[in-house]
């Protein structure tokens, strides 16, 4: 199994809503990542988890809250988002934090209304 | 066909021709350089990487060249196929946990 599975595929939420994005991998990878990608732009790193601990937060606003419940799961909790947060949110994993071969999910297309 | 840095984000090539996608990077301290392919509606897919102490690495139908003197990276795709149509991103890894993506080049393959 070389897949990273993200749910939901699409999400529309209001600015006062609370929602969560989910990511799962069963490759035994110990590093997991959240990226944000706007249309026609490269993915931008948001968070890095290494061995289930948050290692990097790229100055992401607190309305985005990551969580790593176990080594296979990564969540991104969303609260009080703005329309400009609308984007494709990509989850990725790699065997370990120093490994450059990352496996990406298909992403969650988020629209904030 | 050949793209020139980040100022020509679209490359169009004839099926069967070789493609060259270029990338300029800025961080001299990067340990690894990576190429990803992103097809429409999908997440990026790892193609190949190269360590900073190398200048060339070959994969299946792809070759990555690294010129540290001018901070330039290129991806060569041999015998380009319609399935190669995608956006190609170069990325840098500074040896820690961070992989930072460059702006990307869209490759169109004409049948």
Image (cartoon, coloured by chain):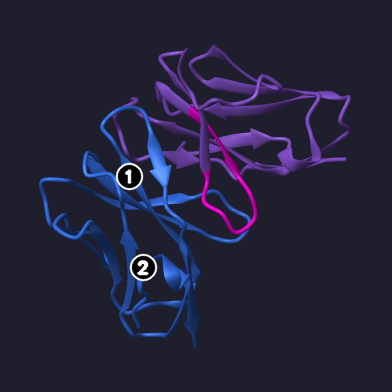
Chain colours: A purple, B blue
Residue appearing at x 63%, y 42% in the figure: A107
Q: Position of residue B48 (x, y in %)?
A: 29, 53
Chain bearing tag 1 is B
Question: What's the magenta region?
Answer: A33-43
For the image, the number of numbered tags is 2
Direction from residue A37 to residue B17 in the image, left or right = left
Q: Which residue is mark 2?
A: B5
Q: Which residue is mark 1?
A: B92
Q: Can residue A73 be seen in this snapshot?
A: yes
Nearer to the camera, B24 or A20:
B24
Q: Position of residue A90 (x, y in %)?
A: 58, 39
| Location of residue A7 with respect to A29 vertically, above or below | below
Q: Can residue B57 be seen in this snapshot?
A: no
Nearer to the camera, B41 or B12:
B12
Asked if disc 2 and disc 1 are in contact, CB closer than 8 Å, the reply is no
Chain bearing tag 2 is B
**Neighbours of disc 2 within 10 Å: few (<14), some (14-19), many (20+):** some
Direction from residue A84 to residue A65 in the image, left or right = left
């Amino acid at each position: 199994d070389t897949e990273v599975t993200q749910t939901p595929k699409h999400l529309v939420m209001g600015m006062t809503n609370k929602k969560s994005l989910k990511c799962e991998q069963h490759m035994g990878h110990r590093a997991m990542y959240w990226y944000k990608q706007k249309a026609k732009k490269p993915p931008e790193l948001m968070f890095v988890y290494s061995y289930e601990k948050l290692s990097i937060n790229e100055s992401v606003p607190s309305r985005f809250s990551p969580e790593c419940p176990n080594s296979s799961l990564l969540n991104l909790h969303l609260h009080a988002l703005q329309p400009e947060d609308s984007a494709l949110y990509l989850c990725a994993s790699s065997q370990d934090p120093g490994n450059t071969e990352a496996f990406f999910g298909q992403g969650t297309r988020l629209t904030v209304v | 066909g050949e793209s020139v840095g980040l100022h020509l984000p679209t490359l169009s090539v004839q099926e069967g021709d070789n493609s060259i996608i270029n990338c300029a990077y800025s961080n001299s301290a990067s340990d690894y350089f990576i190429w990803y392919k992103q097809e429409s509606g999908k997440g990026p897919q790892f193609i190949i990487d190269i360590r900073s102490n190398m200048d060339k690495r070959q994969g299946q139908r792809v070759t990555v060249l690294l010129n540290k003197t001018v901070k330039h990276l290129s991806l060569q795709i041999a015998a380009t196929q319609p399935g190669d149509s995608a956006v190609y991103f170069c990325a840098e890894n500074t040896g820690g946990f961070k992989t930072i993506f460059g702006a990307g080049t869209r490759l169109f393959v004409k049948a």
